[in-house]
Image (cartoon, rainbow, N blue to C red):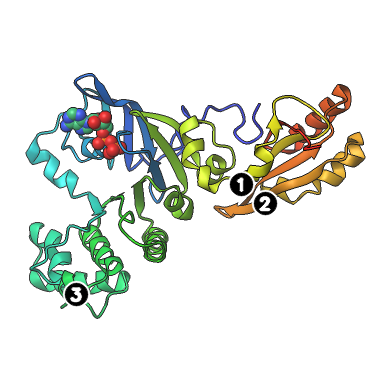
Amino acid sequence: MNALTGTLDPLTIDPTADSDEPPVVRLNAVTKRFGVTAALDGVSLSIRRGEILGLIGRSGAGKSTLIRCLNGLERPDSGEVEVDGRSIVGLGERELQPLRRRIGMIFQHFNLLSAKTVADNIALPLKIEGQKRAARVARVAELLDLVGLADKGGAYPAQLSGGQKQRVGIARALAARPALLLSDEATSALDPETTDSILSLLKDINRALDLTILLITHEMGAVRAIADRVAVLDDGRIVEQGPVWRVFATPRAATTRSLLRAFQPSLPAALVARLVPGRGRRTVLKVVVVGDQAREPLLAELALAVGARASLLHGGVDTVQGRAVGALFLELDGRNETSFAAALEFLRQRASEVEALGHVVDDD
Ligand code: ADP
């Protein structure tokens, strides 16, 4: 049994199953093909109210198709799509309109109308809804305040920075009080500092309004910064999903591992170059520790319990979603099979993941 997930398979558990409230979004076994390409291949996914779900995948993974199935622009070949408790598969264009308004969207290139002021851009969804001018003006002032642009209502998009434009995008997306904010690569065109400020704005709004957010991105950093859960899409399939800290600590799917490469502590290249398979005097282990595990005096306890002296080669402890998550690279004498097995067993009971990477061949 995996100490982190119990006996549950993270690909099949429904995180919203224990809640009375219907999820804001529910996809069940959604398949969409274009000729021989399965853009979506049996995708099941739920987002509960107030949650930020990161959906991550490389180009061509099926992210846009999933968005189009969610807002009814594309009809799945099979499967169910529910938004805000209502099934949208099979609805006609007229019935889809009000449901589409339940989803506010923000985009990589902001999609603002350049000939309209910031205030008019934000008011657009309210105008479409038929709201009276006075109500629109009051709501726009509220929204400008929410996104930190109280003094920019009269400005035109060309007069704003990228980060400010995205703030307008967020205000416009929230104008009609949607059930879901769908962020489609909304920070991909921004510099790192602006990305951070937009992500923290999204997190603040999520907390303040209990807003549900689907964060679609190819950037693991964005997911790590604000998402509660992450689902990894690859070739039209969800290959992994779970709490962000769990996926960052112990990614399982090859795609996730590769997307996370930049975030994973790794052995220095000089050591990797001298690493060969099997055990030896200088056997190298990778040990992943999470939460309280990361604070335990692991090496001292290992020495006490089984008499094995391991040294720390490399590694560190980071914080993801408020939890300590660490990867330590240890060196241990692996020549005696019995004591090596005892050390491995000890570590496996205390860590989330233990992997023998090989052993280092000395230069001499
Ligand atoms: P992503 O948004 O993750 O880059 P897409 O949903 O755009 O992925 O595409 C998923 C797969 O489906 C890709 O192989 C893409 O070429 C294919 N695809 C998407 N839309 C169409 C379409 N309208 N016609 C043919 N193939 C499509």
Residue 230 on image: x %, y % = 45, 42
From where the camera sits, is residue 156 visible? yes
From where the camera sits, is residue 267 visible? no
Give the residue at mark 2: 316
**Residue located farthest toward the top when viewing the structure as drawn:** 36
Q: Nearer the viewer, residue 123 or 192?
A: 192
Q: Nearer the viewer, residue 256 or 79?
A: 256
Q: Which numbered disc, 3 or 1, marks the residue that appears first in the sequence?
A: 3
The reply to whether the C-beta atoms of the residues labelled 1 and 2 are less than 8 Å apart is: yes
Residue 150 on image: x %, y % = 26, 78
The reply to whether the C-beta atoms of the residues labelled 3 and 1 are less than 8 Å apart is: no
The image quadrant where one finds the C terminus is top right
Crowd tier of the residue under label 2, counting other residues whose Cα lies within 10 Å: few below 14, some 14–19, many 20 or above: some
How many numbered marks appear? 3
Give the residue at mark 3: 159
Q: Which residue type carries mark 2? A: Gly
Q: Which residue type carries mark 1? A: Pro
Residue 178 on image: x %, y % = 25, 53
Q: Which numbered disc, 1 or 2, marks the residue that appears first in the sequence?
A: 1
Give the residue at mark 1: 265
Q: Residue at x 46, y 37 (%)?
A: 15
Q: Which residue type carries mark 3? A: Gln
Asked which secondary structure carries label 1, the reply is loop
Instruction: Tell me where residue 53 sits by quadrant.
Output: top left
Crowd tier of the residue under label 1, counting other residues whose Cα lies within 10 Å: few below 14, some 14–19, many 20 or above: some
Residue 275 on image: x %, y % = 69, 33
Q: Is residue 231 left or right of residue 72?
A: right
